[in-house]
Image (spheres, grey):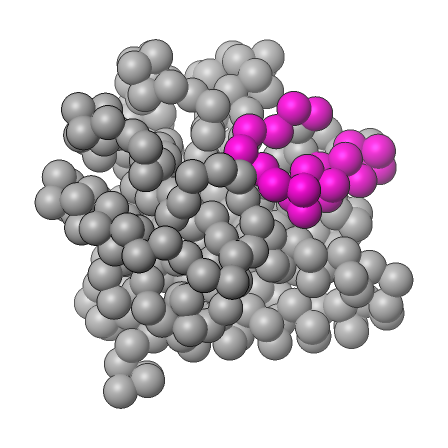
Amino acid sequence: MNRIDARFAELREAGRKAFIPFITAGDPDLDATAALVRELDRRGASLIELGVPFSDPVADGATIQASYTRALDGGVTVDRILDTVQTVRSDVSAPILTMISISLVQRRGIEAYIDRAKAAGVDGAIIPDLPVDESDEAVRIAAAADFPLVMLSAPTTPAARRRLIAERSRGFVYCVSLTGITGARADLPPEVVDHVKALKALTGTPVCVGFGVSRPDQVARLCTVADGVIVGSAIVRLIHANTDAPRDELLRAVGDFAAGLADAARPEERS
């Protein structure tokens, strides 16, 4: 069993939900990324999502777009990111996923990318710009390698397409909470609960919610229906705000914030 499926099985057995932080690989630098991955794991992350910087990001709001630009300006590459994962893999229990554009995967070749990523210790991938109806080859290769490909379902996804996404997604289904781009929101649309329920009716694969989530109360609310919650922009913004601080202060700030979100994803500890 791959690490992602094993982690969700552990969470289900413990009656817990997943807290999945997103950070941009290479922002502010790859040494910081390695330290942040270790800190997030130590402070309660169930899985960790690494954004692979791309010059034309898909659905990413201003916060993540800016972090991608900073990382690319710093010389980050796919291979350097995978090398970084390899350096931390033995220190980190949380599964690690990459969020990566299909263009970067196809540049190397789907099979070659998965082989390289697995060798580095990456456990799965989210490819947001891979259309589900063009995913046959990627799904087949990933399944043969036991490398989960997580697919996204948006509020505007038609029912037939949502069903196909639910059938093909492995690891978890990424339920996009709102229309538009990523970024912390003061409020989430009430329709997200129905969206989660609709996906869960189609699959036994865990369903996790992302986009717009930034506060413990939002995490707690979503975890009453979803199997986990993804928080990205709020963490990326906090990292950037502490870029010039001493490294231990950066780690403490991000770790404290992550710990509060992780606690909110543990309903048995709030009861």
Q: Is residue 108 above or below residue 67?
A: above
* Residue 189 locus on image (x, y percent): 36, 54
Lateral position of residue 74 relative to residue 15, left or right: right
Residue at position x 20%, y 67% from top? 13
Q: Which residues are magenta?
A: 55-74
- Where is residue 41? Give x, y as percent: 53, 64
Residue 189 located left or right of residue 72: left
Quarter of the image for the C terminus: give it: bottom left
Q: Is residue 188 left or right of residue 202?
A: right
Q: Which residue lies at the image location 79% right of the left edge and 47% below the top edge?
A: 29
User: Can see residue 93?
Assistant: no
Q: Nearer the viewer, residue 122 or 63?
A: 63
Quadrant in the picture for residue 85:
top right
Quick one: 213 or 22, which is closer to the camera?
Answer: 213
Residue 149 higher or lower than 255, as above or below: above
Q: Would you place residue 178 above or below residue 39 in this image? A: above
Q: Residue at x 68, y 38 (%)?
A: 65
Residue 149: horizontal and vertical position, in percent? Answer: 36, 32
Foreground pick, 123 / 263 = 263
Please indicate, yes or no, whether residue 160 appears anywhere in the rendered image.
yes
